[in-house]
Image (cartoon, coloured by chain):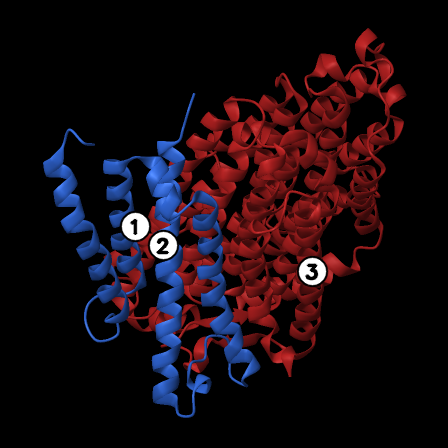
Amino acid sequence: MIGAHYPVLQVVIPLIAAPLCSLLPKTKLPWLFATAIAWICFAIAIVLLLQVYQYGPLSYEFGSWPAPWGIQYYIDIVGAFVLVIVSAVASIALLASRCLVETDIAPHKHALFYTAFLLCFTGLLGIVATGDAFNVFVFLEISSLSSYALIAMGDNRKALTASYEYLIMGTIGATFILIGIGLLYSQTGTLNMLDLRERMHAIGGFRSVHAAFAFFTVGISLKLALFPLHHWLPNAYAYAPSVVSTFLAATATKVALYLMYRVFYTIFGFEFSFDLLNLGLILLPLSIIAVVISSFTAIFQPGVKRLLAYSSLGQIGYMTLGLSLASKAGLIASIIHLFNHAFIKGGLFMCMACMLTRMKSTRYADLAGAGRTMPWTSAAFVIGGLALIGIPLTSGFISKWYLVLATLEKDWWWLAIIIVFTSLLAVVYVWRVVEQLYFREPHADCAYVKEAPPLLLACTWIMILSTVYFGIDTRFPVTMATAAAEALLQ
Amino acid sequence: MRKNPILRETSHLLIPAILLFALYVQFHGDYGPGGGFQAGVIFASGVILYALLHGIKKAEKVISLTLAKTLAAIGLLLYAGIGVLGIFLGGNFLDYNVLAHDPTHGQHWGIFFIELGVGITVATVMISIFYAFAKFKK
């Protein structure tokens, strides 16, 4: 009986857990509670994915009001896949967060930290689960507001300005999305995504629909940190507490990308977005610039967290690049990379979290010789770095392989060459870290640091090993991405 | 405060009226304009006015920061709890029809408690934000 309610429980369980969490005492209870909730959500997400894969999309009507009038939750294979990614990363990050939160955040704020984390988690799950355009905006605000608070909790004072910058840019982005929704509502009189899609066919291309399309494109690109709207991201990820950078880097931009798929494919439809308005012509050059410039910039960063943030911008560029090819193969490549990059970047940020617990800094010079003092963490970073470059037997290779195949399908040799060239840039910036870790003498004050706490290290290795596993056994991401691309292109 | 008898006496006149008006907006929300959010803001403005005129310490005797935070969580839980109650009584999430013996009463009760949850949370969050700024020290 309860099985029919899984689509809503996915979002409501963390939503109810958040206020409960704020009432918990200053012990390790908030951590245990939040972690348990995240794992329950992960289990629900897996059940949902299995159900959707076997029996097709699930729909759930709030308050039993029928679909175009009431709020509907609609979970198809794309949504279920992203739900699994988000909840998997959240459960691992929360499990690992115990010692990170103890060092980064004052004890009386622990319960509130986990409350904000659960709210952010709720928002991200809600954006994916809902089938109502206005509901998307509400959950976008829930996730954004709580992530501003989470970023501001970083111990560096610059975290405050980073968070404030993100607040300004994020609010502009969300407002643009809201204007887009408003314009569509004025033209169609509906907010239900599936209903919007049908009426969109009927009314065709009014100018206000074109304007709505433009507002959506800019708003989502801001949330996605697509070049040139990316400026908020590097500081936000670099100064946030490590567990927050891990979680946001692996999920927040991915959910924004999911929103992009939803808006361009489900609401506006492929023909309107790519044939009539030539979205590919705008996204393609921006993605190429994003990939090239961010990879170059990543090489010259003073610290590893900033390096990873810039590398994230480049990887987002690969995902939008796949999208901009306007083909099924490109879309599949984009979705596969969405999955793989979540675990690669999550794992790498967790390596940095391990180092931060012992070294208190992730500047290059301070990491010198960590290969000897923290061998397990350093090895994890090397494997994650190889996946980021796209070496065979790692999941990064699978992403690049499908992306190159998609470009060759269009006979765009030059684009395939750009992808390989930017992977070489990744070799440069990963090598800069590896050189510090393994080929430098440790500083006198860092010579005797211990390996990271066991629980944190174990979680890091789960992330890193999953990138290796999905690099060898590609059935799960490839099957899901193919099914998702087919569902989107219907 | 003793130096400003006009402010003090006006506040004594105004604050009860503000709080009463908040309750009116809250509970009359399903018949006229109003609802939980507006009522919460009005109620909080009454408390904030009291704190501005009589000092934060006296205001905290009425509603302490801990109490405000707890009530904020409870209001949200009331909202979500009514939603989940719908599931347990055999309907969907936020289904009010199943809350009472017939759907009309169910809808009435559902909206009543949901708005009450909204009102409690909005009022106490406004008060907490005010305390956070008022007690801020460098």
What separation in Å lies between label 2 and label 3 (alpha carbons)? 31 Å
Helix, strand or loop status at disc 3:
helix
Q: Is residue A372 above or below residue A285?
A: above
- Going by the numbered disc 2, the residue's amino acid type is Val
- Going by the numbered disc 1, the residue's amino acid type is Ala
Chain that bears disc 3: A
Chain that bears disc 1: B
Asked where in the image residue A213 lies, by quadrant, the reply is: bottom left
Which residue occupies 12% across, 36% down? B5
Whether residues under marks 2 and 1 lie with C-beta atoms below 8 angstroms apart, the answer is: yes
Image quadrant holding the C terminus of chain B, namely top left
Q: Is residue A122 above or below residue A249?
A: below
What separation in Å lies between label 2 and label 1 (alpha carbons)? 8 Å
Q: Which mark is residue B44?
A: 1
> Which residue is identified by label 3?
A42
> Which residue is identified by label 2?
B122
Is residue A399 at least partly visible in the picture?
A: no
Chain A: drawing colour:
red
Helix, strand or loop status at disc 2:
helix
Asked where in the image residue A301 lies, by quadrant, the reply is: top right
What separation in Å lies between label 1 and label 3 (alpha carbons)? 38 Å
Task: Answer with mark 2 or mark 1, whichever residue precedes in sequence.
Answer: 1
Is residue B59 at least partly visible in the picture?
A: yes
For the image, the number of numbered tags is 3
Q: Is residue A440 above or below residue A467?
A: above
> According to the colouring, which chain is blue?
B
